[in-house]
RNA sequence: GGAGAGGUGGCCGAGCGGUCGAAGGCGCAGCACUGGAAAUGCUGUAUAGAGGCAACUCUAUCGAGGGUUCGAAUCCCUCCCUCUCCGCCA
């Protein structure tokens, strides 16, 4: 959520930054509504002040022996009743304006960082660096897509998953399940060693939490909802983990907070019919190790760079070729001010595919979720900055391994770093 | 699921219609005392919004929302959450 005060102070600047994303976001309506609302607030609080005075006056008169039924008291009550009527008229108006402003603010995306490249869509994202060219497989022309090799090896079952759920689900069998588990453990151990504290939050989360991180109100159709309860299946650990601190005032000394978290993630993938219909790339349910940081505002840019490195370190240890893309303003997620995507090489389709998305949300989520910190011995509070990134998506990592480590004989080698976790070096039929 | 108890400031805890943003204590900060500290004493110590250059002023907030009243932390209604006992259950 944007800061209303800041919009008021720097309207041109805010509008200019929003325009870098999309011209549909116009702040003028918010400014107009806010002006009306503040005028009403001033009038209303004056009336309330007068009413408070009257109540005190009545209290004093009764205490000094005057009857509550006396003419004098009755007259003052009449004035108060008069004011109450005016208030009954004003209050709903003000409340309505506040709701309108709040809804508008919730529907506005974050301001892009000054450093975010300007562009209209994903074609204008900027490649920042590329790693692992030496590890590109040299037998690309004979490599099968991961779903084919996975089914041949008997470790991925898509048809049976469809039978028990629907399309876009997978059943992992034998070494498939073991590899998933190994990847989770490997990634968690590495991120714990890098300083992140592990958490395992609930998979079902409430609407307030989804609003806090920005999925609601605009993107409700992307998540699975439990229709009998105010609960949703978490689309990413970002939501429960960031919201652990919702409505909290942290001591400055507690910052920075670093969490890593393995969770299943559930997404409806509405609007992606026909896209990535095969394999592990786009499923309704997938596993992910997520990194979440809660930091002081002035540190968020450097914390962001460090978080990207933590995610990259996993790919490097697995020796999977990847590139780092910085998203342009037109492709930036709703709450992000700046975002890097890590894209892993998938030889069967001859492309890089997103395997991690690392964003700095600045104070956007902190404002919605009301996560603040307090400096010792100082008055007032400040909003924290929140960041998160995948470290990494497990299913897509498995897809990348099945393809990049595929041998001409149809077996799949296991990356060195993963062998201790799996207890073997090769998957074969 | 059934029965009961309860949700007050950073924490503990009083207040149960009147000047209460809320006694008292703990904690924390400043000052005094001290060679220094402890102990002690004094003072201060919530959040948000609006107005003002500022000092500051006003408003709201005692789980949330509504109601009664000139006036609600206190009374009434609805909801949420926590705890205890019973049942069921991985």
Image: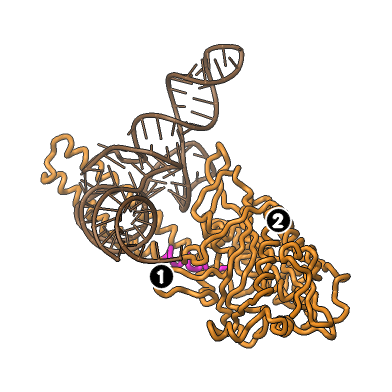
The quadrant of the rendering that contains the C terminus of chain A is bottom right
Q: Residue at x 85, y 71 (%)?
A: A135
Q: Quadrant of residue A314?
A: bottom right
Please tell me whether residue A44 is drawn above or below residue A355 in the rendered image: above
- Up the image or down, A294 lies above or below A60; here it is below
Residue in the image at 83% along x and 85% along y: A142
Magenta segment boundaries in residue numbering: A97-109
Mark 1 and mark 2 residues within 8 Å of each other at the beta carbon:
no
Q: Is residue A233 left or right of residue A177?
A: left
Q: Nearer the viewer, residue A185 or A36?
A: A185
Q: Is residue B40 above or below residue A25?
A: above
Chain displayed in brown: B
Q: Which residue is mark 1?
A: A229
Residue A408, image quadrant: bottom right
The chain containing the residue under callout 1 comes to A
Instruction: Give the residue pinned by disc 2.
Output: A301
* Residue A5, image x, y percentages: 54, 56
Q: Residues within 10 Å of mark 2 (few under 14, many from 20)?
A: some
Q: CA distance from mark 1 to mark 2?
A: 38 Å
Nearest to the eye among marks 1 and 2: give it: 1
């Amino acid at each position: 959520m944007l800061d209303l005060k800041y919009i008021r102070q720097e309207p041109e600047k805010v509008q200019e930054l929003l325009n870098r994303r999309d011209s549909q976001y116009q702040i003028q309506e918010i400014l107009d509504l806010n002006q009306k609302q503040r005028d009403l607030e001033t009038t209303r609080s004056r009336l309330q002040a007068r009413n408070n005075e009257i109540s005190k006056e009545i209290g004093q008169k009764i205490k000094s022996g005057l009857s509550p039924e006396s003419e004098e008291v009755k007259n003052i009550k009449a004035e108060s009743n008069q004011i109450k009527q005016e208030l009954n008229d004003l209050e709903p108006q003000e409340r309505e304006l506040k709701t309108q402003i709040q809804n508008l603010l919730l529907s506005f995306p974050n301001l892009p960082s000054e450093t975010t490249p300007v562009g209209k869509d994903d074609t204008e994202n900027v490649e920042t660096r590329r790693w692992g060219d030496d590890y590109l497989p040299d037998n690309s022309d004979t490599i099968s897509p991961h779903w084919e090799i996975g089914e041949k090896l008997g470790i991925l079952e898509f048809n049976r998953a469809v039978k028990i759920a629907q399309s876009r689900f997978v059943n992992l069998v034998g070494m498939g399940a073991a590899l998933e588990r190994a990847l989770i453990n490997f990634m968690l151990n590495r991120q714990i060693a890098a300083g992140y504290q592990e958490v395992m939050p609930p998979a079902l989360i409430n609407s307030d939490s989804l609003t806090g991180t920005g999925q609601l109100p605009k993107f409700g159709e992307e998540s699975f909802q439990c229709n009998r309860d105010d609960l949703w299946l978490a689309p990413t650990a970002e939501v429960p983990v960031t919201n652990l601190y919702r409505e909290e005032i942290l001591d400055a000394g507690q910052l920075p907070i670093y969490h890593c978290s393995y969770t299943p993630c559930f997404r409806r993938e509405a609007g992606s019919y026909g896209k990535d219909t095969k394999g592990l790339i786009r499923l309704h349910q997938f596993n992910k190790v997520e990194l979440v940081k809660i930091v002081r505002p002035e540190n968020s840019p450097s914390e962001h760079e460090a978080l990207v490195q933590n995610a990259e370190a996993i790919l490097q240890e697995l020796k999977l070729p990847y590139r780092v893309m910085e998203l342009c303003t037109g492709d930036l997620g709703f709450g992000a001010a700046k975002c890097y995507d890590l894209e892993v090489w998938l030889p069967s389709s001859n492309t890089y595919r997103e395997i991690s998305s690392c964003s700095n949300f600045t104070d956007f989520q902190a404002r919605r979720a009301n996560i603040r910190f307090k400096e010792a011995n100082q008055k007032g509070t400040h909003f924290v900055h929140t960041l998160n990134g995948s470290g990494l998506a497990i299913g897509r990592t498995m897809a990348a391994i099945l393809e990049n480590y595929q041998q001409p004989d149809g077996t799949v080698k296991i990356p060195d770093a993963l062998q201790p976790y799996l207890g073997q070096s090769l998957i074969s039929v």
